[in-house]
């Protein structure tokens, strides 16, 4: 029987594991084969998918991406913001006050500054033209990086199979994703085309046999070093400077 890529056991229960979280729009068929993730791990790691969905909720909402099980696009768990779909399109309430307020749909919105997930807005007026700008924090939740590494490793399994994935070589990846042990770093690049697009590419293998996974979620490309001790990452950073210049890319965690 197929062993689970996370716990290396089999609970005999079949579950369907989407490589990209369903709530972000996983391309058809981009799923792992039955048993490659056991039901227990599928459930226990769902909070990491949620952390990734949470980070990309605003761009998903703006691009009308339905959430899991076809639910309407929405922004819900940011404390000072609620975004829903009304009869005439998007309805957003943002609270920048230091006290809670009532919103367009009757619910309460928390005070600004109470949560690191709050969205900051600013309002400028020039004659008859008013501009509202949003500032959305990104990547502060440590679970977000674990969620991105989980996607990268699942993508590797999709392309290269479980024989490779179950080897000890990837045990440090399992420990990081399952328990948050160790440090992993990811490189992010803004696509700048503003399009919401989800796409994955086959893993890249270095001359020394290290694996690198690249995929795009929403408007961001992620480059994930899956080598046991992040040996590719310094080169990656250097190459990113050469290829992309100083702007348009960043890495997480910021103190690596
Ligand atoms: Zn498992």
Image (tube, rainbow, N blue to C red):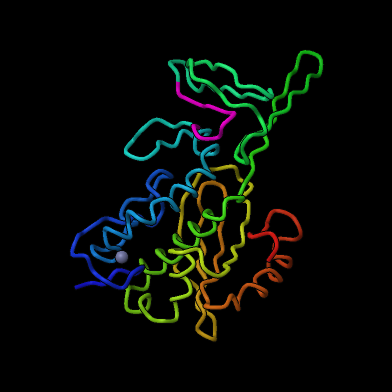
Residue at screen point 28% across, 66% down: 36
Q: Residue at x 50, y 73 (%)?
A: 204
At which x and y percent is residue 169?
A: 44, 81
Image quarter hosting the N terminus: bottom left
Residue 114 against residue 155 in the figure, above or below: above
Q: Is residue 137 magenta?
A: no
Between residue 157 and residue 15, name the one nearer to us: 15
Specify whether 223 is left or right of 254.
Answer: left
Task: Name the residue located 73 percent from the left edge and 65 percent from the top edge.
Answer: 241
What number of labels is visible?
A: 0
Give the x, y percent position of residue 150. Answer: 44, 61
Which residue ends up furthest to the bottom in the rendered image?
Answer: 208
Near-viewer residue (227 or 182): 182
Residue in the picture at 56% in, 32% down: 79
- Left of 110 or right of it: where is 165? left
Camera-nearest residue between 150 and 100: 100
Where does residue 98 sit, x and y in percent of width and height? 69, 24
x then y, percent, for residue 197: 49, 47
Q: Which residues are magenta?
A: 75-85
Quadrant holding the C terminus: bottom right
Q: Looking at this view, name the residue that lies furthest to the right.
A: 127
The part of the image, by quadrant, that contains residue 254 is bottom right
Residue 76 shown in magenta = yes
Determine whether 250 is above or below 242 in the image.
above
Question: Is 115 rendered above or below residue 236?
Answer: above
Tell which quarter ligand 1 is in.
bottom left
The quarter of the picture where residue 85 lies is: top left
- The answer to whether residue 27 is left or right of residue 88 is left
């Amino acid at each position: 029987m197929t062993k689970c890529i996370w716990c290396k056991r089999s609970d005999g229960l079949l579950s369907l594991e989407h490589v990209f979280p369903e709530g972000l729009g996983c391309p058809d068929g981009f799923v792992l084969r039955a048993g490659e993730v056991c039901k227990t791990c599928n459930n226990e790691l769902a909070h990491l998918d949620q952390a990734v969905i949470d980070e990309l909720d605003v761009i998903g909402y703006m691009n009308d991406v339905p959430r899991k099980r076809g639910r309407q696009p929405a922004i819900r768990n940011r404390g000072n913001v609620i975004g829903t779909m009304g009869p005439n399109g998007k309805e957003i309430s943002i609270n920048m006050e230091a006290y809670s307020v009532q919103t367009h749909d009757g619910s309460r919105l928390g005070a600004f500054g109470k949560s690191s997930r709050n969205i900051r807005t600013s309002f400028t007026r020039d004659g008859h033209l008013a501009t509202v700008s949003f500032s959305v924090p990104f990547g502060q939740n440590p679970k977000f990086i674990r969620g991105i590494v989980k996607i990268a490793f699942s993508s590797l399994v999709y392309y290269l199979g479980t024989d490779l994935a179950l080897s000890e070589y990837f045990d440090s990846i399992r420990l990081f994703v399952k328990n948050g042990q160790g440090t992993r770093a990811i490189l992010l690049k803004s696509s700048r085309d503003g399009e919401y697009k989800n796409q994955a590419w086959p893993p890249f293998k270095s001359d020394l046999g290290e694996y690198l996974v690249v995929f795009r979620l929403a408007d961001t490309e992620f480059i994930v070093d899956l080598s046991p001790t992040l040996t590719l990452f310094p080169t990656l950073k250097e190459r990113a400077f050469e290829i992309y210049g100083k702007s348009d890319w960043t890495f997480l965690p910021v103190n690596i």
